[in-house]
Amino acid sequence: MEKTEKPESLERALEKAAKIICTLKCGLCPHSEEGFSGCLSECDENILPWRCWVAHLRDISSTV
């Protein structure tokens, strides 16, 4: 039986995965990751790196 997920729970799961990856990568931006398409905005002290990971994960999932 296939379980369908609500969009909100998928977003929370994506955010949690991005935060875990970001923590494992010591808070580094995904700019050195294969397939990284570029930054969403100019980096400054207000950028939260896990948000860059969310964007990167979304981007690579659309190419699979």
Image: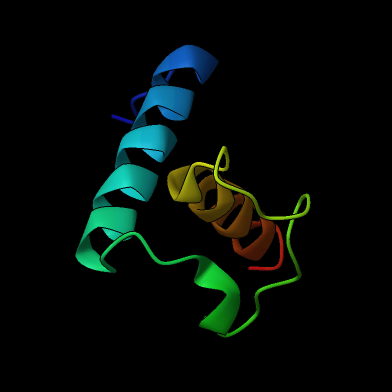
Q: Please say whether residue 10 is visible from this viewpoint.
A: yes
Residue plotted at (54% across, 83% down): 32
The mark total stands at 0
Left-right relation of 31 to 17 = right
Residue plotted at (30% across, 58% down): 21
Q: From what the image shows, is residue 57 above or below residue 14?
A: below
Q: How is the image coloured?
A: rainbow
Q: Where on the picture, by quarter, is residue 13?
A: top left
Left-right relation of 19 to 56 = left
Q: Please say whether residue 4 is visible from this viewpoint.
A: no
Left-right relation of 5 to 35 = left
Query: Toward the viewer: 60 or 25?
Result: 25
Residue plotted at (75% across, 71% down): 37
Q: From what the image shows, is residue 22 above or below residue 14?
A: below
Query: Toward the viewer: 11 or 49?
Result: 49
Q: Position of residue 51 (x, y in %)?
A: 53, 42
Q: From what the image shows, is residue 33 above or below residue 63?
A: below
Left-right relation of 58 to 9 = right
Q: Quadrant of the C terminus?
A: bottom right
Residue plotted at (50% across, 54% down): 53
Residue at the front extreme of this rendering: 45
Q: Position of residue 41 (x, y in %)?
A: 78, 50
Q: Quadrant of the N terminus?
A: top left
Q: Position of residue 4 (x, y in %)?
A: 42, 22
Q: Position of residue 50 (x, y in %)?
A: 44, 46
Q: From what the image shows, is residue 51 above or below residue 6?
A: below
